Amino acid sequence: MTALHLADEGEAADFAAFLSRLLHYDRGAAVRLQAAGTALAVFGRPPSFEVLAIRTARLAKPYEDGLDVTLDVTVSAGELLETVDETAATAQVPAAVTGPPWAGVLPPRGGWRPETGLPAPDALRATVGAAVGEFRRRSEELAPENRTRAELDRIGREIWSRTVAATGLPVRALHAAQSLGFLRAEAPVTLFSSGAWLRLRTPYGSVAVRRAGAGLGMPAFSVR
């Protein structure tokens, strides 16, 4: 296996925490890793939220494997997590796996521009709380014979597909950011767009979504 040398124990702990959260929602989760220089980007797609989660990490030294100076591989999140040594601040890259479809359609390298209209962070967290409360209330109000998976999914789609103010960002992106530990009380939040993509960014990670009806064929995200 090829070793990743993370910048410090804290970086390794955050890296492991992100993988653990992805595995909480999908025990068979895969992640795409991209490394160049001293930057590592980890991409995952928790199925409950239908968004792309992005976590970056600092490496202690430039990634290299023989003559290779960059890394771009899709691996099992569980196998990767098992190799993380927080004390040593290292991880071993496991064998590549056949990537899920989402792994081939990452956000673009550049062209990101800031979007206005995003409410304050405390209002964003309140939006998530209200949505969770509404889903719980409406689910509990259903008669037992009507509390089917199909009906619960219908209610969920209605609630989580709503947009945040006039930004076009679906509420499910906020829910994902909070559930993955990105949307924290002290963290500033910014919204960017590039082509068909919207990206909610905090210091702890990003959540990206494609606008409805967007086609494929965009260039891959770069860790640079």
Image: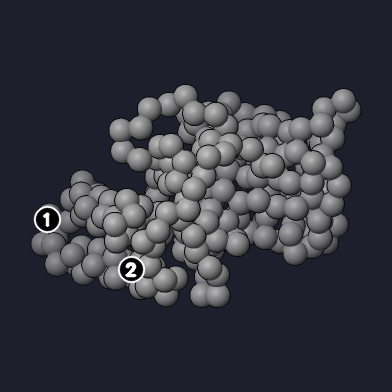
Q: What residue sits right under mark 2 in the picture?
A: 127
Residue at 75 percent across and 64 percent down: it is 10
- Residue 180 appears in the rendering: no
**Mark 1 or mark 2, which is nearer the start of the sequence?**
2
* Figure quadrant of residue 142: bottom left
Q: Secondary structure at mark 1?
A: helix
201 relative position to 142: left or right: right
- Residue 63 appears in the rendering: yes
Q: Amino acid at mark 1?
A: Glu
Q: Amino acid at mark 2?
A: Thr
Residue at 79 percent across and 50 percent down: it is 59
* Figure quadrant of residue 196: top left
Which class describes the residues within 10 Å of circle 2: few (<14), some (14-19), or many (20+)?
some
> Which of the numbered marks, if any, corresponds to residue 145?
1
Residue at 57 percent across and 32 percent down: it is 220
Above or below residue 123? Residue 210 is: above
Above or below residue 192? Residue 62 is: above
User: In the picture, which quadrant includes the N terminus?
Assistant: top right
